[in-house]
Image (cartoon, grey):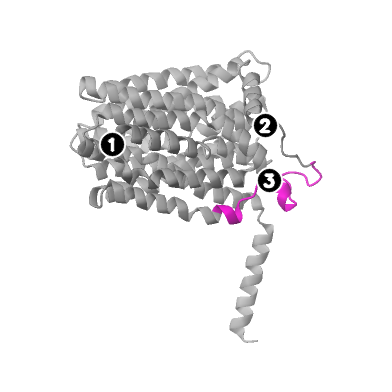
């Protein structure tokens, strides 16, 4: 054997040894991250479609915003039932069907000619299918595969939404500008289809399928069986438990405002607002994508912090800073472009940072057994806020000719939400009934 062969053999042995030490839970995180990136890219696409559809079909911005609002509403509304279905039939099968339906809805987009077709495809089909790979999935995967570092995992998988925005928005905006929105839709559909084999080959439903226990769990711990029962009934029983708690409503109320001010307002209307102030659509998409860069960073850091700090104070800080950023935004449009970059940095760091502390606080209220379903239920409220803001911001733009009023109202709501979350757990003998912080990374 030559020296080169010996070195290659040693390197291969080292790679195998590293792979053997790597818990499959981290591979599940990587696969889920990739799938969430793709579906987040699909959900971000309507903000690119607003101006082209308005120009070609002369549909009003309120009409297009209505379709986006339906998308956001159904994306959240299906979550509790999707979580229960995933609990019952497995993540692999559920995610495969959802991704295939998403690809079909996007592929049919170039055939649109009437507003109802936009509502059907992007509002109903894509709203429901992406909802099966919704915001609850981060908590679901963390609870199913991890005993330690749950907050970090929630932060990473929540950050995947920002990564999807970062990867897809500039590309989709450039394609829509130079090749047309129809070609953009076909490229997006092909990208979704390309991820189906990865999901089919590598995704697994639970650690027990591989003879493993959760990451960080004692090997002597008892394996949990897949739950039986009607998924709809399971979802509503979980909700009935949660609504009896005042803290549940405080958490959900903050999440309503969170949805209204992120996906509903900025995610849907920032590009159009940039166009209103003389910037190109590509520049607006670039600004939104830059927000995604910092959201990716902020979400991951927030997950790490949520395992260690008081999550009420974290939420107070995130909502408060986001509110100040929105109060600043209308004035930044009339300043040099770097002023919008300041908004992009601050808002991006806060965009999804609220998810990990919200999940940790909710665990303290309802426990870990049904955390995926309960996160899905508060995501329903989150998306009601998103849908409301997406639609009413479009109406305000028509009535006043500007988004100024929408941005200011959203900023005030966030300041109120920041104060509200400080009362979570008030009057309890303990600060939070949540799981113990994970060990330091």
Task: Indicate which disc, 2 or 1, sits on the residue closer to the N terminus.
Answer: 1
The magenta segment:
199-222
The reply to whether callout 3 and callout 1 are in contact (CB within 8 Å) is no
Crowd rating for badge 2 (residues with CA inside 10 Å; few <14, some 14–19, many 20+): some
Mark-to-mark CA distance, 3 and 1: 40 Å
Q: Look at the picture and state if 170 lies above or below 56.
A: below
Select label 3 or label 1 by which is in front: 1
The reply to whether callout 2 and callout 3 are in contact (CB within 8 Å) is no
Give me the disc on residue 50.
1
Regarding mark 3 in the picture, which secondary structure is present there?
loop
The stretch drawn in magenta includes residue 213 = yes
Q: Residue at x 24, y 42 (%)?
A: 281
Q: Residue at x 58, y 31 (%)?
A: 81
Mark-to-mark CA distance, 2 and 3: 15 Å
Task: Say which residue label 3 marks.
Answer: 206
| Residue 297 shows up from this direction | no
Crowd rating for badge 1 (residues with CA inside 10 Å; few <14, some 14–19, many 20+): many
Task: Say which residue label 2 marks.
Answer: 368
Q: Is residue 331 left or right of residue 369?
A: left
Select label 2 or label 3 by which is in front: 3
Q: Residue furthest bottom?
A: 2
Q: Residue furthest top?
A: 427
Regarding mark 2 in the picture, which secondary structure is present there?
loop
Crowd rating for badge 3 (residues with CA inside 10 Å; few <14, some 14–19, many 20+): many
Task: Indicate which disc, 3 or 1, sits on the residue closer to the N terminus.
Answer: 1
Tell me where residue 421 appears, x and y as whole percent.
52, 20
Select label 2 or label 1 by which is in front: 1
């Amino acid at each position: 054997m030559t020296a080169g062969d010996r070195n290659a053999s040693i390197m291969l042995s080292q790679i195998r040894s590293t792979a053997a030490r790597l818990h499959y839970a981290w591979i599940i995180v990587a696969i889920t991250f990739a799938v969430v990136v793709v579906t987040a890219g699909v959900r971000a696409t309507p903000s690119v479609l607003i101006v082209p559809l308005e120009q070609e079909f002369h549909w009003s911005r309120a009409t297009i915003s209505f379709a986006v609002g339906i998308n956001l509403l159904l994306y959240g509304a299906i979550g509790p039932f999707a979580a229960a279905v995933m609990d019952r039939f497995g993540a692999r099968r559920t995610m495969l069907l959802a991704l295939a339906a998403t690809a079909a809805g996007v592929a049919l987009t170039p055939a649109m000619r009437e507003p109802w077709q936009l509502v059907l495809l992007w509002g109903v089909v894509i709203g429901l299918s992406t909802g099966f790979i919704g915001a609850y999935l981060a908590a679901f995967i963390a609870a199913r595969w991890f005993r330690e570092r749950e907050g970090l995992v929630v932060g990473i998988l929540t950050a995947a939404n920002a990564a999807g925005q970062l990867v897809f928005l500039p590309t989709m905006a450039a394609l829509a500008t130079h090749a047309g929105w129809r070609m953009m839709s076909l490229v997006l559909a092909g990208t979704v289809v390309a991820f189906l084999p990865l999901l089919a080959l590598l995704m697994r439903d639970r650690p027990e399928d591989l003879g493993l226990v959760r990451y960080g769990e004692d090997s002597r711990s008892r394996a949990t069986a897949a739950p039986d029962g009607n998924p709809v009934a399971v979802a509503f029983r979980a909700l009935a438990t949660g609504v009896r708690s005042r803290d549940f409503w405080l958490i959900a109320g903050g999440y309503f405002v969170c949805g209204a001010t992120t996906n509903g307002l900025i995610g849907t209307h920032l590009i159009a607002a940039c166009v209103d102030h003389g910037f190109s659509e590509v520049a607006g998409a670039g600004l939104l994508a830059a927000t995604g860069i910092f959201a990716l960073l902020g979400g991951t850091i927030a997950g790490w912090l949520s395992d260690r700090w008081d999550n009420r104070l974290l939420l107070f800080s995130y909502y408060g800073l986001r509110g100040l950023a929105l109060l600043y935004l209308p004035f930044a449009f009339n300043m040099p472009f770097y002023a919008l970059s300041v908004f992009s940095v601050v808002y991006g760091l806060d965009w999804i940072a609220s998810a990990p502390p919200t999940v940790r606080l909710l665990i303290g209220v309802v426990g870990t057994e049904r955390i995926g379903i309960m996160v899905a239920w508060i995501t329903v409220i989150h998306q009601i806020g998103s849908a409301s803001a997406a639609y009413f911001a479009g109406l305000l733009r028509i009535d006043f000719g500007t988004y100024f009023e929408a941005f200011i109202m959203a900023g005030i709501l966030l300041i109120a939400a920041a104060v509200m979350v400080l009362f979570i757990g008030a009057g309890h003998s303990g600060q939070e009934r949540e799981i113990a912080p994970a060990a330091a990374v």
